[in-house]
Amino acid sequence: MTALISLLGLSREFAMTNLSRSQIAPQGGVALWRQIADQIRLEIVGGKLESGDKLPGELPLAERFGVNRHTVRRAIAVLIEEGVLRAEHGRGTFVASARRLTYPVGRRTRFREGLRGQVQDLTSLSLGHKLEAASHRIAQALKIPRGSRLVRIDGVNAADGLPISRATTWLPYKRFPDFAERIAGLLSTTETFASYGIADYVRASTRISARHADAEETKLLRLSPGAVVLVSEAVDADEAGTPISYGLSRFPADRLELMV
């Protein structure tokens, strides 16, 4: 049995409830306009609003959420800037696109294979690499001593020109000292591992959560402030069960869902 993990799946109770005046209130520093923008996103992700649907006007939305029109206007402006909504002069505001990619997460998770048939062009942009010491969390995941030397690789993946993931991968330096240089030439994680004699590897564990994008993610993924990302923490292991990489991927919830 599979499960689609999206912003809806992680916030089901919130998504299925129309927020009232008493519910729209500053919560932990979250601005009113951001809460309204999140609710509209959730209704699109959950299928309540579909591509081409027209949103109610500012006044009905302001009455629904119990806020002033300026607050609603800011929420809508952010979603338009993000590409979730589109404004047509003299006609109103419409859902720009409710289509999201589906990325399967399983025992043999492969980025390109998972999106095959859904997009025409997949590209990867390297943001560089460096060496750093393993934190307690990563050391535990990779089963190595804390402080061990790691190779860190950062990048952004795009589908048909639209960024869909901000990825960071850590690998044990002792085993993969020149992994960054090799993958730059081979352009394939599978082929790069094969160059080290690892014929196959599997997903040992995946942890998924959701949160608002930080400033860097907002910029690199071309999001607007307040956008939500799905966060995947994954450990891959070789055929002997030895962890070989720890990955942290952030996916815009409006553009992609994870299928487990």
Image: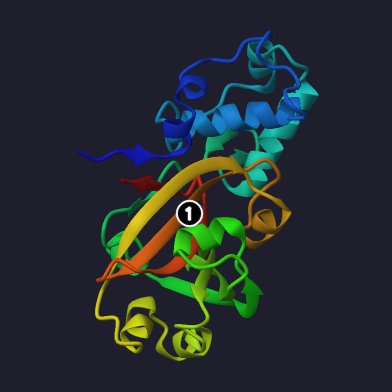
Q: Among all residues in the image, which is located at the extreme left? A: 1
Are there few (<14), some (14-19), or many (20+) residues within 10 Å of tag 1?
A: some
Residue 26: where, in percent of width, then height?
A: 76, 21
Location of residue 26 with respect to 112 vertically, above or below: above
Amino acid, disc 1: Glu
Residue located 49% across and 24% down the image: 15
- Along the horizontal axis of the image, is 223 left or right of 201? right
Q: Is residue 181 left or right of residue 258?
A: right
Q: Nearer the viewer, residue 120 or 90?
A: 120
The residue indicated by pointer 1 is 233
Query: From this viewpoint, is residue 159 visible?
Result: no
In this view, 50 is above or below 113? above
Q: Quadrant of residue 146?
A: bottom right
Question: Percent position (x, y) of residue 140?
Answer: 50, 58
Locate residue 247, reporting x and y percent.
Answer: 48, 62
Residue drawn at point x = 74 percent, y = 16 percent? 67
Q: How is the image coloured?
A: rainbow
In terms of depth relative to the viewer, which is nearer, 98 or 243?
A: 243
* Image quadrant where one finds the C terminus: top left
Tell me the residue at 50%/83% (across/down).
Answer: 174
Residue 239 locus on image (x, y percent):
25, 71
In the depicted structure, whether residue 179 falls above or below residue 257: below
* Whether residue 201 can be seen here: yes
In the drawing, does residue 52 fall left or right of residue 88? Answer: left
Could you tell whether 170 is left or right of 242 in the image? right
Check the image and report above or below for 181 versus 114: below
